Amino acid sequence: MSQRKPLTVFLILMAVLVCAPGVWAVDTIKIGFNIPLTGDIPKVGEGSKYAAEILLAEVNGAGGIKVGDKTYMLQFIYEDNESKAESATAAALKLITQDQVLAVIGPQASKQAIPAGEVCNSYKTPMISPWSTNPQTTTDRPYVFRACFLDPFQGPVAAKFASEEFQAKKAAVLYDIASDYPMGLAQYFKEAFEKIHGPGSVVAFETFTTKDRDFSAQLTNIVKSGADVLFTPQYYDEVPLIVKQAHQLGWKKPIMGSDSWGSAELMKLCGDDCKGLFFTTHYAAAGAKGATKEFIDKYNAKYGYVPDDVAALTWDAIRLLIQAIQNTGGLTGNLDKDREKVKNALAQIKDFDGITGKMTFTPEGDPIKCAVVVKISDTGEFEFFKSVCP
């Protein structure tokens, strides 16, 4: 017994020291991630998590973040929203009420970000969507922000580019009518194109529903329409099917896409059919410089492929959040008060230097930033073609 007693006393002492605030224990800031690790677009969730894991290791490896006169370690909690709206709202609720996170990153796609944003705003918890471009995500939601440009900007950029680059006078559009993101962007493109070329210049405005895999009827109408360009703002898992079927039906004219094309998986699924095509997006990996190239190199070295725009935007969203947390000047330990402090600090961010561009938030929580037009090269790389600013 006499030999065990000192050990017991030592263990009790250690427990007291570890638990005593300001002695050994380092407080932890919990950040939630509401991302699609399964479902239709798992590569989106993968890129989000991979970028987050690199940043988490860097921050904690350097001793955490200093907020006021205290240092905190970061803890990231990942919830799979399965690329479904109902799962995204459930994930948001769990992160806010059970995990008691300070803030939430994601969802990425607008179909999940819009309903999850409603939950986060209702529970007064800051949320940053890295990739959701639909205006509804942030509208009348002071606690909801984004790290990307909006579709009312992206749609006209694509319409103007198609008009100038391809000399297109007539356009066709093919989009998923059951999904918020492509439906909104298709409409913005149509409005902008008809503003340039007059009413009726969008000669085919064809729709399908999520999970459809045969587009032959719609594409037959598009081929017959006499359109000079096809705009299809769909996700990376659908684009190869659309492009290949269009080519099989005799379409030889330009096809243009949007930021949802930007996944590393696109070329694996699409191959030669997508080479030479263009899409609007948030950053171009090929030819990147400075901090953007550093991020790409780190990601590529760790995971074996070039990060897509989702990964880059997630990196920026986390750094925006960390900046806002530090800008509070200090946390109180009261979660409700601290969430409000972080929200207020986010709203004040100006000229944030992100790897996807410089950002200043509008009162609606949307960043003012440029878009990039990317050309898919003959080797399948996403090459910078031109920059378009507001």
Image (cartoon, rainbow, N blue to C red):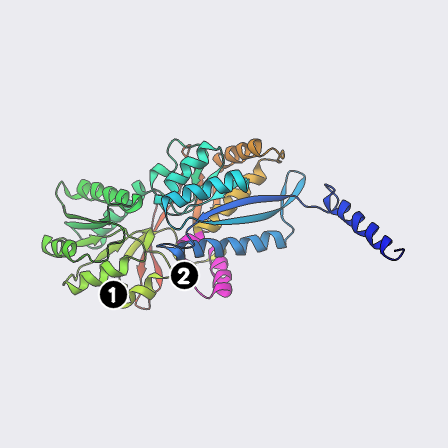
Magenta-drawn stretch, dominant element (helix, strand or loop): helix
Mark 2, residue position: 287
Label drawn at residue 326: none
Q: Is residue 69 above or below residue 243?
A: above
Q: Nearer the viewer, residue 332 or 300?
A: 332
Residue at 35% from the left image edge and 51% from the top image edge: 281
Label drawn at residue 273: 1
Residue at 57% from the left image edge and 31% from the top image edge: 337
Q: What are the residue bounds of the magenta stretch?
A: 292-312
Magenta highlight on residue 106:
no
Question: Callout 1: 10 Å neighbours few (<14), some, many (20+)?
Answer: some
Question: Callout 2: 10 Å neighbours few (<14), some, many (20+)?
Answer: few
Q: Nearer the viewer, residue 180 or 132?
A: 180
Of circles 1 and 2, the one toward us is: 1
Q: For the residue marked with disc 1, what is the amino acid?
A: Asp
Identify the secondary structure beneath mark 1. helix
Q: Position of residue 258 (x, y in %)?
A: 30, 51
Magenta highlight on residue 294:
yes
Considering every residue shown, the one lying at the far right of the view is 2
Q: For the residue marked with disc 2, what is the amino acid?
A: Gly
Q: Quadrant of the C terminus?
A: top left
Q: Nearer the viewer, residue 279 or 44?
A: 44
Residue at 16% from the left image edge and 53% from the top image edge: 218
Q: Which comes sooner in the sequence, label 1 or label 2? A: 1
Identify the secondary structure beneath mark 2. loop
